[in-house]
Amino acid sequence: MAKRYQISDGKLLLTLQPDVGGWFVVTSPIDPAMITQARTVEEAFSQARDAFAALADSRGDATRWNPSSKKAGSRALRHRAVGAGI
């Protein structure tokens, strides 16, 4: 199994798993239904916020996630490698 990396911007916790072609599969322990793809860490946070907003909207809870609060680039990102098999 490929390595996975957990990253946080202080608001979201994401798991990135490298995929073929330079992409990351992006998931989150916050909601297992959220899955998206990105090429960079900054794009992963942007895509995840959009995916969370779409999930909230589809569940009738559109006020929970505010996609206009994208600030992935404004915070120092913490990276932590997570062992394979988790």
Image (cartoon, rainbow, N blue to C red):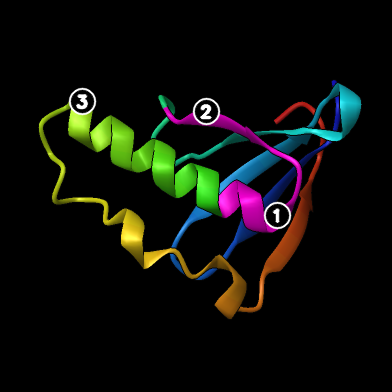
Q: Amino acid at mark 1?
A: Val
| 7 relative to 2, above or below | below
* Label 2 SS: strand
Residue at image point 82% right, 32% down: 84
Q: Which of pointers 1 and 3 lies earlier in the amino acid sequence? A: 1
Name the foreground residue: 28 vs 83: 28
The residue pinned by badge 2 equals: 35
Could you give the CA–CA distance between mark 3 and mark 2, rounded to whole angstroms? 15 Å
Q: Residue 68: x percent and y percent?
A: 33, 61
Q: Are marks 3 and 2 in contact (CB under 8 Å)?
A: no
The residue pinned by badge 1 equals: 41
Q: Which of pointers 3 and 2 lies earlier in the amino acid sequence? A: 2
Q: Amino acid at mark 2?
A: Ile
Residue 34: image quadrant is: top left
Name the foreground residue: 12 vs 83: 12
Mark seen at residue 58: 3
Q: Residue 11: x percent and y percent?
A: 44, 65
Could you give the CA–CA distance between mark 1 and mark 3, rounded to whole angstroms? 26 Å
Magenta highlight range: 34-45
Q: Amino acid at mark 3?
A: Ser
Asked if residue 86 lies left or right of residue 61, the reply is: right
Q: Residue 83: x percent and y percent?
A: 81, 40
Q: Are marks 2 and 1 in contact (CB under 8 Å)?
A: no
Q: Quadrant of the N terminus?
A: top right
Residue at image point 44% right, 64% down: 70
Q: Residue 74: x percent and y percent?
A: 57, 79
